[in-house]
Image (cartoon, rainbow, N blue to C red):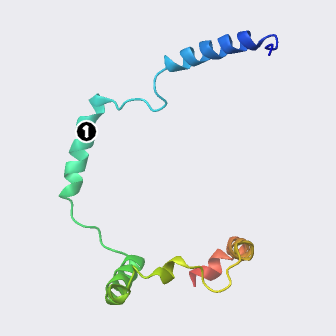
Amino acid sequence: MAHPRGTKALGVCGAVAAAYYLTKPAFVPAPQREHAVPVAGAAAAAMFAPAAYADEIGDAAKKLASDSYEFAKEVDWNNGIYLQAPGNFQPLEALKAIDKMIVMGAQADANLLKA
């Protein structure tokens, strides 16, 4: 089978491009070593800093976690029922419902939510 004209030229161009990109440095540059000392000092200082006072949301999250821990320990997480979709699951309908919730959330009045 005859090769179309230009196939060899295309292969040569591809090889040249590959060689060019292989000689470039990595996408993510290596870390700079001269900045490591100040960062290490800041990290060490942060370890011995006093704990920040929690806000109301943090307090509520801590209470929820401690209250729900006993319940979570009682659940048999190895049970196969957790791998099954609930009821007559329809992915497209679920996606529409999630989209509707996101749209409604975006339209919500932030001032009313603060109350």
Name, please, the residue furthest toward the left.
48
Task: Indicate the position of residue 4 as horizontal and vertical percent values.
Answer: 82, 14
For residue 114, side relative to residue 51 (left or right): right
Task: Indicate the position of residue 58 as horizontal and vertical percent values.
Answer: 38, 76
**Is 45 drawn above or below residue 20 in the view shown?**
below
Q: Quadrant of residue 34?
A: top left
The amino acid marked with disc number 1 is Pro
For residue 52, side relative to residue 86 (left or right): left
Residue shown at the point (21%, 43%) measured from the top left = 41
Q: Which of these two is toward me, 10 or 108?
A: 10
Q: Secondary structure at mark 1?
A: helix
Task: Indicate the position of residue 21 as horizontal and vertical percent values.
Answer: 55, 20
Q: Which of these two is toward me, 87 or 60?
A: 87
Give the quarter of the figure containing the C terminus: bottom right
Residue shown at the point (34%, 80%) measured from the top left = 62
For residue 96, side relative to residue 112 (left or right): right
Task: Indicate the position of residue 111 as horizontal and vertical percent values.
Answer: 63, 78
Q: Quadrant of residue 2?
A: top right
- Read off the residue under disc 1: 38
Residue shown at the point (23%, 36%) measured from the top left = 37
For residue 69, side relative to residue 108 (left or right): left
